[in-house]
Image (cartoon, rainbow, N blue to C red):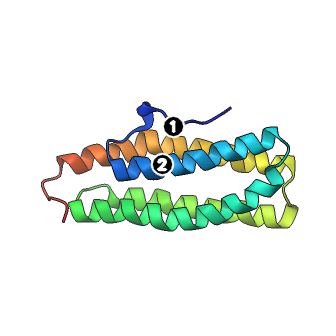
Amino acid sequence: MAVHWTPELSTGLDWQDEQHQQIIGKIDELLESMNRNEARNVIASLFEFLESYTVQHFAAEESYLQRKRCTGFAPHRAQHLEFIARMREMERVFNKQGASTYVVMQVQRWLRDWVLDHISQVDKRMAVSAAECKMPIM
């Protein structure tokens, strides 16, 4: 199932939406490579992207929550830490077993499901909560 950015995924925070569009593009790239039977070439670069993306994106979200002094920081950070742990676990499996169809499908499904759920549930709640906080962004 293809994954594309839609307005329904927007949190209303431009910086966050731009970053979300990047990761959704990478998920779609993996799906397209699977259709062309080229996922082995794409999945290694996907893990490299995720390492960089998670550092930048998660730090931006967490910093935003802290600057706004909103509740919800701890559970949001916990989800990020769970993502990183699962990502590293998936990467270990990939490094050990290679890019078999099973491994690629597992990575693709996990990443798609987690990202779409996180954006549509957690990040949207974060944006609403931050908008209601009294502390201005510095």
Residue drawn at x 19%, y 61% as measured from the top left: 137
Front-lying residue, 17 or 85: 17
Residue drawn at x 45%, y 44% as measured from the top left: 119
Residue 89: x %, y % from top left? 69, 63
Front-lying residue, 71 or 13: 13
Relative to 108, is 89 above or below? below
Quadrant showing the N terminus: top right
Residue linked to disc 2 = 20
**62 on left or right of 38:** left
Q: Amino acid at mark 2?
A: His
Residue 95: x %, y % from top left? 80, 67
Kindly identify which numbered label has been placed on residue 126: none
Residue drawn at x 15%, y 58% as measured from the top left: 136
Residue 6: x %, y % from top left? 48, 33
Local packing at callout 2 (Cα closer than 10 Å; few below 14, some 14-19, many 20+) is: many
Find residue 96 and report its image quarter: bottom right
Kindly identify which numbered label has been placed on residue 5: 1
Q: Is there a contact, CB below 8 Å, between mark 2 and mark 1?
A: yes
**8 on left or right of 114:** left
Relative to 30, is 97 above or below? below
Find residue 78 and report its image quarter: bottom left
